Image (tube, helix red, strand yellow):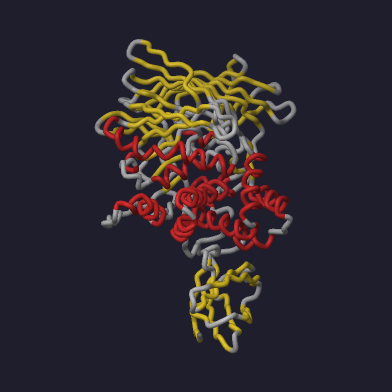
Amino acid sequence: MKVKKNNKILVIALSVAFVSITIIAIVAFLNWQFVFTFSDGLSDIKEKISSESYTDIDVLSYHINLELNSDEQTINGDVLIKLKTKQQNQNRIVLNFYDNFRLSTVTINGKKTDYTYDDNLLILNNTRPFGKEIELRIIYSGTPKNVGLGSFNFGKYKNKSLVYSLNEPVFASTWFPCNDDVTDKAFLKMSITNDSSMVSISNGKLIDMTIKGSKKTYTYVSEYPISTYLVALYSGQYKNFKENYISVDSKDTMLINYYVTEDKLDEAKIDFSIHVEAIKIFSELFGEYPFLKDGYGVAQFLWKYGAMEHQTITGIGSDYISGLKFHTSILVHELAHHWWGNAVSPKSWKDIWLNEGFSTYSEALYYEKKTGVKSLQSTMLSFKNDFEDGPLYNPGLKMFSRLVYDKGAWVLHMIRRELGDEIFFNVLRNYFIHYKYKNANTNDFIKICEKYSGKNLSVFFDQWVYKGVGIINLDYSWVNKNNVVKLKIKQTQGSDIIYRFPLDVEIKYSDGEADTLSFSISQKETELNIPVRKKIMDLVPDPESWLLATFNPQNIEK
């Protein structure tokens, strides 16, 4: 998910030769997320998103048949769930499903079963054990509750119906019965019925489209397991355009589908044109795009705060389609989620930085590949903040704040400096391969880092992920006497943690030459004696912006 702060873009008159590079730089620099705090419908799930996931069922597949009645703002649902029970002699099954629907049929293996509700939990009871594998069918109708970030929406765009869903983190159960647990990935088949003038979209590949009277039904199948928060529904008067991506490894052709309203068609063709190259960049960096059989796509929806990485069919808000490529970072971010979040999903919402921090850093990697290291540095500087609102791990209701997105990106940037490029990208590729279509937590990522680097990284992750609050604040002063620079460094951050980190120092000489030296800092106050070759013009700490720190010069004597 990309939560975007609205910015007024300053248009500067520039020569044509620098326009494309400048637009990329402006977009990177203005890529500030606002702190998105949860409102009604989210504060009551704090315990759930801050606890480890565990349920006593394993869903194998969902077949969701949904009929939309936009005028009445109701749905008719018919959901078939195949699942396994985890306990022996289990005679109780608990599903997440909001209790405002009228249930007309609840059966297990074709037989009617008793059920009760308890705080939006649908509890199925049986006097005898269910058996190891069962098939559950629930037929229901009603109006989905719109909670969280906008779980199910009957909206209008230009006075025309546009329906969409946004389940993250645990609100798929507002519109279909499920095990609304990020760790329980399952296969999905989705059939959406709406007025015949509407185009309906879901995850995966379109396998069928039928018309019956004034109604049209689209059916999609996903070839890959999916978490419930990534299940998508869009339905509106869309125009469709397409392009092809040729996979890096197998050279297979993958279809990319785009769905927008007619008035956005020309702008979308410009904005969305970045995808083929972006998929190639990420496939070369991380490993091949993980959903080749299903394809990729982007659909316009009405969410006002950015975009959502629904698996294989990203949703982007209407306001972010401009034809000016001002919001490329959003599209890149959601695409990156298909590696970080969709293929490799978190074991609990405590680890959401593995989704959002990784995808935010992927924006910086994209710009680095496009225009070079200066774009990497400027993008990272745009992510800089004081991050005083708690540790990165287990952010609770701050899970969509800059803390998670931007500090998460900085953690990856700093571990890249710690490991070096070769090992760092080897870590990312192996982390992706090992946990693809599975779930991982922070410790799993640390183990991969340590395995391929041979380093003990417990101090690094304690101070930047698990325990540390804020960033490093450094006062520094230096004096040059007898060709020796005496550099004094003092950590002044209020945190009780004394940070341990590598610090690069650039010595700039008056003749234009420079030396860059690296030092290991582990004390509150450090004094370094640095021999120099000739007259100094300046001393610059962290010249390539690898460190999440502020630098405050004090007494300088050249």
The x, y position of residue 240, in whole percent, is: 36, 27
294 horizontally vs 141: left or right: right
Q: Residue furthest front?
A: 511
The x, y position of residue 31, in whole percent, is: 41, 53
Q: Residue furthest top?
A: 213
Residue appearing at x 53%, y 22% in the figure: 63
Q: Is residue 399 visible?
A: no
Q: Residue furthest bottom?
A: 482
The x, y position of residue 371, in whole percent, is: 45, 52
Classify residue 390 by image quadrant: bottom right
Residue appearing at x 39%, y 37% in the figure: 273
Classify residue 341 by image quadrant: top right
Whether 513 is drawn above or below 16: the answer is below
Q: Nearer the viewer, residue 14 or 133?
A: 14
The x, y position of residue 271, in whole percent, is: 36, 40
Residue appearing at x 64%, y 52% in the figure: 422
515 horizontally vs 193: left or right: right
Whether 434 is drawn above or below 538: the answer is above
Q: Nearer the viewer, residue 308 or 71?
A: 308
Q: Nearer the viewer, residue 494 or 242?
A: 242
Q: How many numbered marks does the figure carry? A: 0
18 horizontally vs 521: left or right: left
Whether 177 is drawn above or below 426: the answer is above
Q: Nearer the viewer, residue 84 or 368?
A: 368
